Image (cartoon, helix red, strand yellow):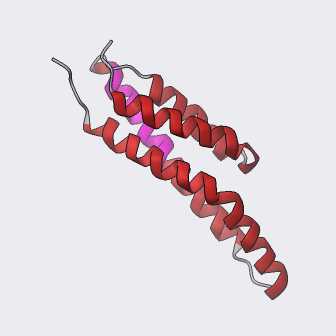
Amino acid sequence: MKRKLKINIITGIADIIMAFLIMISWFAVLFAAVGDAASGTHATGGIGTFFYICAGITLILHIVGWIKSKKNEISIVGHVLGIIGMACFLFTMFLAFPAFVLAILAAIFTLLQKNK
């Protein structure tokens, strides 16, 4: 009987949302920086922090999902890809494209929940 874990479904959905957020992150930060330069505000740090917090939450979900999947003998490939992708994004936003690709792949493999 194939087991399904709720944490894997939640993490897969979080990966899809995070892939979208990673896709728009450069544009949001760039537009915030231009707005800061034009009006003298300080919104860029807050915008960047939002994306980093979302990536951190997704990273935590992947770590928890990895542990639970390993205990239930479900493939951990999606979680490993997700951990690498979120770590890349948390390291620097310059790695947004590899993180975007890894988030999509992580969502696919995490939602499959293939038994070993």
| Image position of 115 (left or right of 34) | left
Tell me residue 51's x, y (percent).
59, 58
Main secondary structure of the magenta stretch: helix
Q: Residue at x 62, y 53 (%)?
A: 23
Q: Residue at x 64, y 46 (%)?
A: 90
| Image position of 14 (left or right of 25) | left
For the C terminus, give its image quadrant: top left
Tell me residue 28's x, y (percent).
67, 66
Label count reads: 0
| Image position of 83 (left or right of 32) | left
Q: Quadrant of residue 48?
A: bottom right
State the extent of the magenta-drawn residues as a range. 58-70
Q: Is residue 97 above or below residue 74?
A: below
Residue 65 magenta-drawn?
yes
Tell me residue 69's x, y (percent).
33, 25
Tell me residue 46's x, y (percent).
64, 70
Residue 59 magenta-drawn?
yes
For the N terminus, give its image quadrant: top left
Residue found at the very far top of the displayed protein: 116
| Image position of 36 (left or right of 107) | right
Q: Is residue 56 above or below residue 7?
A: below
Q: Quadrant of residue 62?
A: top left
Residue found at the very far left of the displayed protein: 1
Q: Residue at x 65, y 45 (%)?
A: 89
Q: Residue at x 54, y 39 (%)?
A: 103
Residue found at the very far bottom of the displayed protein: 39
